[in-house]
Amino acid sequence: MSRVFNFSAGPAVLPKEVLEQTKLDLINYRETGIGISEISHRSQEFEELMQQTESLFRSLLDIPDSHAVLFITGGGTQQFSMIPMNLIAPGTIANYIVSGEWAKRAFEEAKKFGQVHLAASSEDKNFSYIPKTISLSKTPCYLHYTSNNTIYGTQFASEPEVIDENGNAVPLICDASSDLFHKPIAINKYSLIYAAAQKNFGPAGISAVIIKKELLRVSSETLPIMLNYNTYAKNKSLYNTPPTLTIYMICEVLKWLEAQGGVKEIHKRNIKKASIVYEALDRNNLYMPHAEKSSRSLMNITFHLPSEELDKKFISEAAKQNLKSLAGYRAFGGIRASIYNACPEEACYKLAEFIDAFPKMHA
Ligand SMILES: Cc1ncc(COP(=O)(O)O)c(C=O)c1O
């Protein structure tokens, strides 16, 4: 059966080469006669795989020695709890930018673990823009923001600059679940940056957490063992059995990314892919893109048609053309085209053609 163009927001499309290689290694990993998901996580093969995965992470994202790379099960949502549990020190206040649903959930979760402060929000306009003005609390321990808002289709063009009232830089924490690896970033600007794998670098089951080593000192020893960053840092993310197949596939995706020319090259492609779709939306009056132009995401393109009925028609007619998984987030509706790294340019051209053709047929 041939594959379709999959615009799912996550779990999302993976490179075909990765799936083909996984098919082989699932039966016989590197001529061991054992499949990759049957190998012990204590075996030499798996330890080497873990090292290779970390080393690809480091080289592709240019991660300095000052930062550790941790692989943690539990998805992006688990980080909404682990960050405040580990990093709010007594007498300090955790600051949050709420620019979408996931950012809001991170903010709400943090309230359970200490004092929090809403430093900026774009909820007044249904999260259609990236807030520019940030107002920090006194004694901030960190500022958390979400670099790409998967549901609303907005994205920070660069990281927020934050200096507290005493002129000190506030530790920056970023949820990059839907855009890590989509462009080069300066990791040293971050105290912690994390991402769930299932959008841009693997299947579901794990989050990568890149954390400044000096921050590891802050966590209390009374935390549950699997919710303490130190457990992962001290044990190379192998304290207990990790999702081995997911890690294997992440490694394959990173090898694929390296073979494409790395994040610099993929960023150029992402800019082109997004412009193909946005230009089609902008030249047809029928569509109402959700994000303000200056806040548009390169990863998730969101728009509505004039009625829910037309939204549904667009989605079902697109599916007939093999353009699948275009429905917006369940509580938001409309259309969402997720065009992460592994989404081919051809998919964007086909979608743009369909965007042009649909008004003539159905509106
Ligand atoms: C930006 C962002 N953060 C966090 C999450 C939650 O991730 P998970 O479902 O792995 O908990 C998502 C999921 O779509 C997301 O898009």
Image (tube, helix red, strand yellow):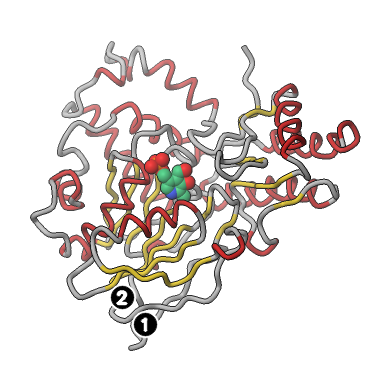
Question: Dividing the image into 4 quarters, which one contains the C terminus?
Answer: top right
Q: Position of residue 98 (x, y in %)?
A: 47, 62
The structure residue drawn at horizontal position 81% and vertical position 36%, both measured from the top left corner, is 353
Q: On the image, numbered disc 1 is attached to which residue?
A: 164
For residue 180, say whether it is visible. no
| Separation of residues labelled 1 and 2 (CA atoms) | 8 Å
* Left or right: 10 in relation to 363: left
| Residue at disc 2, secondary structure | strand
Relative height, residue 14 to residue 267 (above, below): above
The structure residue drawn at horizontal position 52% and vertical position 54%, both measured from the top left corner, is 148
Marks 1,2: beta carbons within 8 A: yes
* Mark 1 crowdedness (10 Å alpha carbons): few <14, some 14-19, many ≥20: some
Q: On the image, numbered disc 2 is attached to which residue?
A: 140
Kind of residue indicated by mark 2: Pro
Please state the quadrant of the image where ligand 1 appears: top left
| Residue at disc 1, secondary structure | loop
For marks 1 and 2, the one nearer the N-term is 2
Residue toward you, 328 or 306: 306
- Of all residues shown, which one is farthest toward the bottom? 166
Residue toward you, 52 or 238: 238
Residue 59, label in figure = none
Q: Position of residue 57 (x, y in %)?
A: 37, 47
Q: Position of residue 71 (x, y in %)?
A: 29, 43
Relative height, residue 96 to residue 36 (above, below): below
Quick check: is the Cβ at mark 1 less than 8 Å away from ligand 1?
no
